[in-house]
Image (spheres, rainbow, N blue to C red):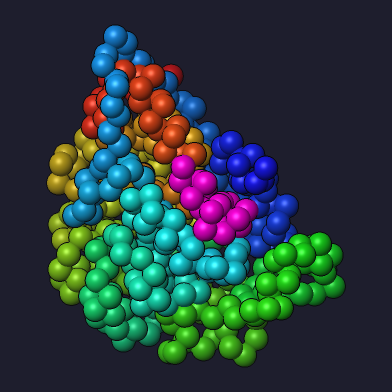
Amino acid sequence: MNSLDSCYNIADLRVRAKRKLPAPMFHYIDGGADDEWTLLRNSQAFSDYQIIPNHLRNIESIDLRTDILGTTLDLPFFLAPTGMSRLFHHHKEPAACRAANEAGTLYSLSTLATSSLEEVAACAVGPKMFQIYILKDRGLTREFVQRCKESRYQALCLTVDTTIAGNRERDLRNGMTMPPKITMKNFFSYGSSFEWLFNLVKNPDFTLANVAHRVDALEKNPMGLIDYVNSQFDRTITWDDAAWLAEQWDGPFVIKGLQSVADVKKARDIGATAVMVSNHGGRQLDGAPAPVDCISVLRDAIGADLELICDGGIRRGTDIIKAIGLGADACSIGRPYLYGLAAGGQPGVARAIHLLKTEVERSLGLMGCCSIDEVSADQIVRL
């Protein structure tokens, strides 16, 4: 039996990913900042909510379609922007993009991808979003906007919570660098990951494809990701920069990394159409609240003025249902699909999407709902 078929949930994919990856790569996916309190809270917070089912409903047909970011997805979740997919599988970002497209959902490409935005745009025809950082090279930001328009990206997403890199101690302990560097300290970890190491030798290219032509910081020597962020990201960005970017894009514009009512209202005022409620997967400010705990408060404050996307901690289909019942328009997943990518390339990503889709569909039926739109706030009750 295909071992991916023996992965019955996201936790199983995580176990397989850990077995296949060198320690620096796995812990880069898996780790968080400082004591990892926020990382753990992101998932544990969903356990604070219970689902109240309604029975004797006609659930013969269950509809998962979701309107978000100016398009209709077949699923109530999509793939969040995550950097440097080549670290986890040699098929890189196109593998994840194709899996998302085949499932009828959206793929988000990171500025720090190891495939160019043009390459990803050419690999599939489904909806795509480009996640943008404002680097010290401001000309690159203007270039990104034009390239995304030419490559027909549906939405642009500005991440705002990484002007200073979080303290990711797992990366420091495991010698995580970009590109990967084998040392005496991590030699056995790399040496035991035979498939990954074979593909490293076969294809050693770990270029940050969207920025390498203007930012050559990684060409001379391997660099820790914390050092890279602190050397290249612009700490002077303000709401004026976000407003300028929204105006330049003139389409669905998302701000990722907001959690406060004041920030979400400001996002609305400067022209954002959506907010990804996120703490960067627990990788930045340790002690920040779980996104799911912010959703109902933000929805009450902003009404229907903005789309809210719950980003962080999702491991089960019921997590997605809880977030939507609390007021999210959709959810995004990062680690779940990266575990799948590491576990088996494009089929692994497809497996992660399939597992969550199946769980959402089954749970909706057990709740007495025949569509994701029928989930109501009174069915999600805090303990």
The span picked out in magenta is 335-354
Q: Quadrant of the N terminus?
A: top right
Q: Nearer the viewer, residue 79 or 378?
A: 79
Q: Residue at x 69, y 52 (%)?
A: 18
- Tell whether position 338 is magenta: yes
Quadrant for residue 252, please give it: bottom left
Q: Quadrant of the C terminus?
A: top left
On the image, the x and y values in percent for residue 230 come to 51, 74
Q: Is residue 53 above or below residue 325?
A: above
**Residue 91 seen in render:** yes
Residue at x 29%, y 22% (from the top left corner): 60
**Residue 286 visible here:** no
Q: Quadrant of residue 77?
A: top left
Q: Is residue 144 left or right of residue 189?
A: left
Is 215 situated left or right of 179 in this image? left
**Count of marks placed on residues:** 0
Q: Residue at x 53, y 34 (%)?
A: 44
Residue 86 position in % (x across, y down):
57, 69
Apparent side of residue 260 relative to residue 354 in the rendered image (left or right)? left
Q: Residue at point 58% right, 75% down?
A: 227
Task: Tell me if residue 114 comes above or below residue 131 in the rendering.
Answer: below
In the rendered image, residue 378 lying in the magenta stretch gets the answer no
* Rendered position, 205 above or below 15: below
